[in-house]
Amino acid sequence: MSPPVRRPSRQVAEAWQPRLYAILVGLLLIIAYVVAFVVKNDDDVKLDFVLFSTETTLIWLILLSLGLGILIGVLLSQLYRRRRGDRGREPRNPVAELPRGDEAVREP
């Protein structure tokens, strides 16, 4: 006769949450990647504007470019939505979508 199979107690089964641990591992990997990215891109670069120039680290230049790109993208999408909305998109008329008298199903 084989020994009975022991199942983990309900507390142990509830304490083990694989999704939570997967999220934590994923976050740790992202944090490690960001730290490595910052360390790798710490070189000084000269940034020339039209009227002046400055020297900064490459990571700040990357973050500035990312921030400006996001800001410009959001502003352009809002401008597009506003222009498209003003151009005569008619409001929805739910009464017009009702079936006409000859299409209506009549109950006996």
Image (spheres, rainbow, N blue to C red):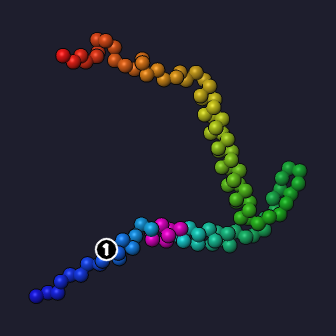
Residue 51 placed where, x, y %? Answer: 89, 50
Q: Is residue 24 above or below residue 98?
A: below
The residue at 26%/78% (across/down) is 7
Quadrant the N terminus occupies: bottom left
Is 64 placed above or below 42 here?
above
Q: Where residue 35 appears, x then y in whole percent?
A: 64, 71
> Amino acid under label 1?
Arg
Q: Left or right: where does residue 80 sit relative to residue 42?
A: left
Residue 108, by quadrant, is: top left
Q: Is residue 18 left or right of residue 3?
A: right
In this view, the residue in front, 51 or 17, is: 17
- Magenta segment's dominant SS is helix
Image quarter of residue 76: top right
Residue nearer the viewer, 108 or 85: 108
Q: Nearer the viewer, residue 8 or 32?
A: 8
> Residue 43: x percent and y percent?
75, 70
Q: Which residue is mark 1?
A: 10
Q: Position of residue 99 (x, y in %)?
A: 34, 17
Seen at 80% across and 64% down, the residue is 56
Q: Is residue 89 left or right of residue 1?
A: right
How dense is the environment of label 1, judged by Cα within 10 Å: few (below 14), some, or many (20 and up)? few
User: Residue at point 85% right, 50% down?
Assistant: 50
Residue 60 part of the magenta-drawn span = no
Residue ID at (69%, 53%): 67
Residue 26 on the magenta segment: yes
Whether residue 42 sits left or right of residue 18 in the image: it is right
Question: Which residues are drawn in magenta?
Answer: 21-27
